[in-house]
Amino acid sequence: MKALKHSFKKFQKYIMNTAKRIKKEHLIQEYFKNNVLFITFVLTAVINSTALRFFCMHSLENYLSFKAILADTIVAMFIGSFAYLIKPRNRFIYYLSFCIFLAAICIVNSAYYTFYTSFASISMLSLTQYVGEVSDAVVENVIQLKDLFYLLAPITLIIVHYKLKKKNYYKKVEIKADRKARTFKTLGATGILLFIFLVSLSSLDISRFFKQWNKEYVVMRFGIYIYQANDLITSVQPKINAMFGYEQAYKKFNDYFAEKQPKENNEYTNIFAGKNIIAIHAESMMTNVIGMEFNGQEVTPNLNKLSKQGMYFSNFYSQVSVGTSSDSELTYNTSLMPTKSGTAFVTYSDRKYIATPHLLSDMGYYTFSMHANNADFWNRRTMHKTLGYERFYSKTDYEVLKENLIGLGLSDKEFFRQSLDKLETINSEKEHWYGLLIMLSNHTPFSEVDKYGDFPVDIKETIETENGPEEVSYPYMEGTKLGNYFKSIHYADEALGEFITGLEERGLLDNTVVVLYGDHDARLPKKDYNRYYNYDKENDTTLEKEDPNYKEYDSFQYELGRKVPFIIWTKDMEGTKLNFENTNVMGMYDVMPTLGNMFGFHNEYALGHDIYQIRDNNIVVFPNGNWVTNKMYYNSQKAAYLSLSDEPITEEEINNNTEYANRLLDVSNSIIVFDLLNEEKRKNME
Ligand code: GP9
Ligand code: MN
């Protein structure tokens, strides 16, 4: 302790002395005098990046973001520090080149943002037809006066340089220079700032940085220069990954599909041939709300109705990884699994995919997707094109009024209402069509409770008192995240109900099959489920484990509870042989082969199965290596399972299924990383 005190005192003294020295010897003024070009370079780079945030994101919080300013300073100082290794009179060229380069990054992003309300990505360059479109558009409509602001940086640097030259400055600093020492000192100072920056980052900042798709967020926290460098790495990395091991991956892929059971027809083959399709991607919609009630009021009356009237798959799982919504869309459209690293939508948007919209297009369908959010969210603008959607109706195709906002953007009710008009037009113009509509309102954190409408999740009871019957209420799920989720999903369900009514009124259901899937679970806290299942209303608490009425909700229950609904519905299905509940385990990767069988398209490289071919023999593999069958749920990390039937379980069965799961994940990953479905590429390799 004493030693610590002593060192602290010593450090304090050192700081005091240094401060005195700085004051006495006018070191700061000296520093400024001797490093004019370096300081100009750093300042202009930081001002440019700050201006870019100001012009693009218009909020004080964004353009005065401390983290971004710090990050920009670090980048500029890092680049600038190496200039000290060069002779003073040659440094100007070094600074000017980098100054122009950094200004160019700002100009490109500024112009790009005006057009796309997003920041630029190098990966876009690989889509050649897209580049054509963009460059035309940029030249014709987009370059504006504000984009030229960034040129002030090199202009300032040039002016400063000539002023210094006039004063014979370079000759003076030449004498004083100790080049290596200056470089190291500047790098040292940069290192200290970097340390402060890293400490200031939250886990959300870090995770978004690595995912990179939420570009505005990354630019806001890391500045434009780090964003662009990160973008370069994330765009190039998959190309490098794909350079090694192609042959081996191709062999494994061939072996895998050579063993796959060929497609067989069954009683559902072509039952919907020629029908139009409306697919609804239901954000965070889970199966456990189906049939649920509070005080006699159904949480999701419309979803309940669809599940009762249609073909309802009640044992259905989504198979998402870190790409959540986008992973779900990938698997739904291609019957492939999410990639092991990165996300297919962002990292591998330039690969060839055999996707439902491609196959339907080949059959003469007009294919489109609709989502009233920013088109670049999850890189959909690019990826929906890659998947074969001929048109993507995104935020700019909708009227987004402030009063209609919920959570991430336009409310589901308004989204569906405006989509109806578009669907009506499409229906009048196209003979066959397929549309994917992506919902948005029921998105975590489910906190805008006042916008969801009135849906109490308490317990109301009427009790007899001396003064007659009186209504009492126990808070139950009120104020919990799960409770808020119920309110939110009630809203989403109402939106769904209004949409179905709207479709019916406009005659859009006459020749249409509605397909609905929940994209992933809502990631709700386990303790809230515990309260839901074990509420002790007398004490307003959760029952103890020891209580005889306690219902176990352990991690297995939680995993099984992550089921999402999958429903195939037509307006006249009720009471027919297609109206039933299918309880066989099924995954998102089985959707494409199952629908393919019903509508008449086939993807021979699907990883899932037509559920009517595989029936009760199915296995659903999750990206983390876990898997589930009708008989058991297996957690591969813990090497533990939960039995789901009375049938005995053998070790051999567990090993075989685990091997199958690993192989499937491996092949799926290789298909995407090595672009194995791209025959042209194959030819070039041979
Ligand atoms: C964004 C929406 C949500 O447009 O689809 O994505 P998520 O956060 O669920 O992945
Ligand atoms: Mn989602």
Image (cartoon, rainbow, N blue to C red):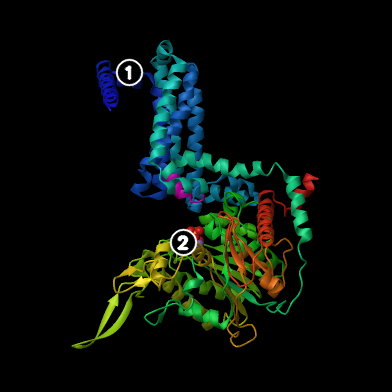
Residue on which disc 1 sits: 30
Ligand 1 within 8 Å, label 2 CB: no
Q: Give me the residue at 50% from left, 23% from top.
A: 93
Q: Quadrant of the N terminus?
A: top left
Q: Give me the residue at 40% from left, 73% from top.
A: 548
In this rendering, position of residue 168 left or right of residue 559: left
Q: Looking at the image, is 407 positioned above or below residue 239?
A: below
Q: Quadrant of the C terminus?
A: top right
Q: Give me the residue at 63% from left, 45% from top.
A: 238
Q: Looking at the image, is 102 positioned above or below residue 612?
A: above
Q: Which mark is residue 523?
A: 2
Q: Which mark is residue 514?
A: none
| In magenta segment, residue 214 | yes
Name the amino acid type tagged 1. Glu
Residue 390, horizontal then vertical, whole percent: 63, 63
Near mark 2 (Cα within 10 A), the count class, few <14, some 14-19 or many ≥20, is few
Q: Give me the residue at 42% from left, 46% from top.
A: 220
